[in-house]
Amino acid sequence: MFRTLRERISKASDEAAGEIERDIKRGRKVSGKRLDEVLWPLEVALLEADVALPVVEELKAEMKRRLGEARFSRREDIESSISAAFRESLVKMLGKGRTSLVKRVEDGERPFVIMFVGVNGTGKTTTIAKVANRLQKRELTVVLAAADTFRAGAIEQLQLHGERLGCRVIQQKAGSDPAAVAYDAIEHARARRRDVVLIDTAGRMQTNSNLMDELAKVKRIAKPHMTIFVGDSLAGNDAIEQARRFEEAIGLDGVILCKVDADAKGGSALSITHTIGKPVLYLCVGQGYDDIVPFQPKWLIERILGEGDPPEKAEVISE
Ligand SMILES: Nc1nc2c(ncn2[C@@H]2O[C@H](COP(=O)(O)OP(=O)(O)OP(=O)(O)O)[C@@H](O)[C@H]2O)c(=O)[nH]1
Ligand SMILES: [Mg+2]
């Protein structure tokens, strides 16, 4: 077993050394086949980190483009070049549409409305409480909309968070129209000059078109400034399919990945961003209000290279 990915790449390039050194001595570019061999450990590490196969292939193609253009004077240069090319390729992929939620809110209209969607149990309601707490720390006032009128206990769950955080929860009785709850919450925020409305919605399978239509109705009525998909990092490739369906059915502006503390591989962050072209805004790393971290490409890169520590808590990393 090799400890870090770099050691594994180094071993692979040792094995291909004769051929590579011949290429270098003749002043040639290193052949695509040799690069394939040297990149193999990286490919395995990406798959082990739950990065989807088509994304791995595109990343590899991008790296081969970068490395294939280079002429190396020593074999050792290849290892450091791979590491650098990998970082650059990944940052390029993860950088698509990067945005800070807090900044969007601070610069946006009042009330700024954010709707949270996703399948059952991914962490939507808990994430809303974490985001509310984060916004409150920036002196923003928050109203929560209990638009999950479907699941028993969902209203009470949000109400409890509201009490702990000291923010108003707008609700109606169980079974009522979620779009009407969202509308009420926005009207309340407007009348009381509150800064932000966070809309909780009922979890639903991406394959249930009736429920997706209901969500589209909430969106039509509430006209949120942002719609955020909350995904479970443990769902692996399924989280990618979910994000794609939600993007198609209602449109998304960003992603929050939960339960990264339990998974910690985080490759689905890369796959989702690549698939729907929307940024990952935060990673959630536990059940406490501060267990939410702005997503930094650097964290995932180090994770895959086998050098990363767990993400730090909210106070440490600013947006
Ligand atoms: N370890 C860990 N647990 C989490 C995280 N986020 C949420 N949870 C837990 O996951 C469970 C489901 O969270 P909820 O916030 O209720 O999920 P939801 O998407 O609102 O669920 P539904 O309303 O049923 O669709 C709860 O027990 C949370 O405490 C996280 O980042 N890490
Ligand atoms: Mg919920």
Image (cartoon, helix red, strand yellow):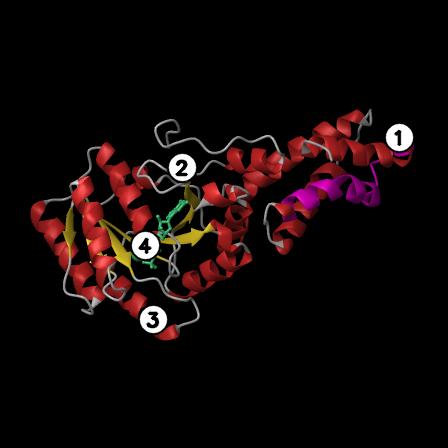
Q: Secondary structure at mark 2?
A: strand
Circle nearer the N terminus (1, 2): 1
Circle nearer the N terminus (4, 3): 4
Query: What residue is disc 1 on?
Result: 21
Cβ(mark 4) to ligand 1 < 8 Å?
no
Q: Which-is-in-front pick, marks 1 and 2?
A: 2
Residue at 44% over, 70% down: 207
Q: Where does residue 241 sit, x and y in percent of width and height?
A: 50, 61
Q: Where does residue 138 sit, x and y in percent of width and height?
A: 24, 32
Circle nearer the N terminus (4, 2): 4
Instruction: State the mark number for residue 211.
Output: 3
Q: Are marks 1 and 2 in contact (CB under 8 Å)?
A: no
* Farthest bottom residue in view: 210
Q: Which residues are magenta?
A: 21-47
Label 4 to label 2: alpha-carbon separation: 17 Å
Q: Is residue 25 magenta?
A: yes
Q: Are marks 3 and 1 in contact (CB under 8 Å)?
A: no
Query: What residue is disc 2 on?
Result: 294
The amino acid type of the residue labelled 1 equals Glu
- Circle 2 crowding by C-alpha within 10 Å: few under 14, some 14–19, many from 20: many
Along the horizontal axis of the image, is 235 left or right of 18? left
Label 1 to label 2: alpha-carbon separation: 43 Å
Label 4 to label 3: alpha-carbon separation: 14 Å
Query: What residue is disc 4 on?
Result: 116
Q: Secondary structure at mark 1?
A: helix
Does residue 111 appear anywhere in the picture?
no
